Amino acid sequence: MKANFITKRLKGGIYAMKGFYLLLKTEPSIQVQAGISILMVVAGSYFDISREEWMLQTLAIGLVMSLEGANTAIEEIADFIHPEFHTKIGLIKDFAAGAVFFAAVAAVIIGILIYYPYIVNINL
Ligand SMILES: Nc1ncnc2c1ncn2[C@@H]1O[C@H](COP(=O)(O)OP(=O)(O)OP(=O)(O)O)[C@@H](O)[C@H]1O
């Protein structure tokens, strides 16, 4: 019983890793977000941002990437259950994309709050 529980959780982890790999390999929107995330990590190292700033930046990256992944999954479901044009499918996809946009706006604000003081200091 206990071994069965652990095996199931381990399998779940493997499927999640597979999804993570497939998203990065096949989805242009995820690849773009991953590229931006790498640039942010480079910027963080360059400006030597604080521990708290790393935490916020990591949280923002994780939030945007995970919502982008969920948005991709919703688009796939929508296309699978109704491949033809339908206003409801359009609305569902727009809602899912809107959810990513909320997180992206928050991430941009966090980015400005973190990097603005460093960039201003460079120019002084
Ligand atoms: N089946 C559909 N019916 C109605 N509107 C749709 C449909 N598919 C897409 N749309 C509209 O187009 C927008 C973009 O759709 P979607 O995110 O699926 O991108 P795409 O144009 O299919 O390209 P990609 O698959 O590369 O993301 C949606 O937010 C929605 O407004």
Image (spheres, rainbow, N blue to C red):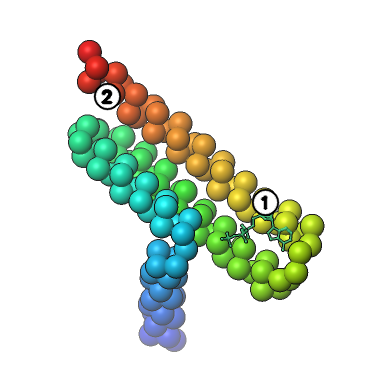
Give residue 86's position: percent from left, percent from top: 79, 62
Q: Is residue 64 visible?
A: yes
Q: Residue at x 28, y 23 (%)?
A: 119
Residue 30 versus residue 51 in the image, above or below: below
Can you tell me whether the CB of the residue at mark 1 lies under 8 Å from the nearest atom of ligand 1? yes
Task: Name the disc covering residue 94, or none.
Answer: 1
Q: Amino acid at mark 1?
A: Asp
Image quadrant occupied by the N terminus? bottom left
Closer to the camera in the image, 82 or 17 = 82
The answer to whether 33 is drawn above or below residue 7 in the figure is above
Give the mark count: 2
Q: Is residue 9 visible?
A: no
For the residue labelled by badge 2, is the local secondary structure a helix, a strand or a loop? helix
Q: Residue at x 31, y 35 (%)?
A: 53
Across and down, in percent, residue 112 comes to 40, 28
Is 81 on the left or on the right of 34, as rendered?
right
Q: Residue under circle 2?
A: 118
Q: Which mark is residue 56?
A: none
Taking the image as four quarters, which one is ligand 1 found in?
bottom right
